[in-house]
Image (cartoon, rainbow, N blue to C red):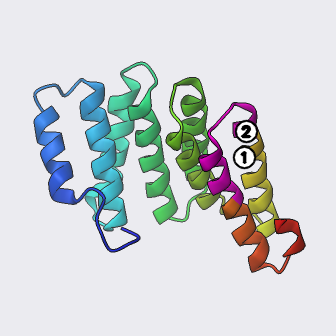
């Protein structure tokens, strides 16, 4: 909800979950649960962490795929809310899963949550190094330029924050 327009609202996500309800053991149900958990976490609803845990449990019952990536990211978000670096492990696992399946945006999303949950980082330079190493790995994996540019822009924002304008070039 960064532009004031909801991407998927809670009502729509509850509807998606009810549509998938006849198939509670399906990857679609796990995905709907993960997306609902993310929306609940952004809205700071107490059901968010519970649904994030459920989404991971549901998604792990299937071949690793997009549902597991989103479930792990929702779990990272829940840890982030608690300022617990354990979210980094979930985000790193999400990236590893995303690297093994044919997805693109999910790789970038996992990198953002790795950085967001890096509470143990002692400096902005560590966060920049994290973005850079992930960007280089994704470059080597052939990720589309638009996604790489998004990661590079995050590096630049952090560098500008600490006054290192020349390193942004």
- In the rendered image, the residue lying farthest to the front is 145
Res 139 label: 2
Figure check: 83 above or below 57: below
**Where is residue 101 drawn, in percent x and y?**
52, 25
Distance, label 1 to label 2, CA atoms, is 6 Å
Please report contact status of discs 1 and 2: CB closer than 8 Å, yes or no: yes
Q: Provide the secondary structure element on which disc 2 rests.
A: helix
From where the camera sits, is residue 120 visible?
no
SS type, badge 1: helix
Q: Is residue 135 magenta?
A: no
Q: Within 10 angstroms of label 2, few (less than 14), some, or many (20 or more) residues?
A: some
Q: Quadrant of residue 39?
A: bottom left
**Is residue 35 left or right of 135 when viewed as pictured?**
left
At x 35% / y 61%, what residue is drawn? 41
- What residue range appears in magenta? 137-152
What is the quadrant of the N terminus in the image?
bottom left
Q: Give the residue at x 70% y 71%.
A: 157
- Which of the 4 image quadrants contains residue 59? top left
Residue 1 appears anywhere in the view:
yes
Which SS does the magenta portion mostly show? Answer: helix
Q: Is residue 133 left or right of residue 79?
A: right
Q: Residue at x 71, y 57 (%)?
A: 152
Who is closer to the viewer here, 78 or 135?
Answer: 135
Quadrant of residue 71 within the rendered picture: top left
Q: Position of residue 141 (x, y in %)?
A: 70, 30
Q: Which residue is mark 1?
A: 135
Pick the residue in front: 151 or 74: 151
């Amino acid at each position: 909800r960064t532009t004031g327009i909801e991407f998927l609202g809670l009502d729509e996500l509850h509807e998606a979950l009810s549509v998938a309800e006849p198939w509670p053991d399906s990857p679609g149900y796990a995905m709907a649960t993960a997306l609902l958990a993310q929306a609940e976490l952004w809205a700071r609803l107490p059901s968010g962490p519970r649904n994030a845990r459920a989404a991971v449990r549901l998604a792990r019952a299937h071949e690793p795929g997009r549902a597991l990536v989103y479930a792990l990211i929702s779990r990272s978000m829940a840890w982030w809310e608690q300022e617990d670096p354990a979210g980094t492990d979930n985000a790193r696992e999400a990236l590893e899963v995303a690297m093994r399946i044919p997805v693109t945006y999910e790789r970038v999303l996992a990198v953002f949550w790795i950085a967001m949950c890096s509470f143990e980082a002692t400096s902005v330079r560590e966060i920049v190094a994290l973005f850079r190493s992930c960007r280089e790995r994704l470059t080597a994996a052939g990720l589309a330029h638009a996604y790489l540019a998004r990661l590079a822009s995050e590096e630049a924002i952090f560098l500008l924050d600490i006054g290192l304008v020349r390193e942004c070039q």
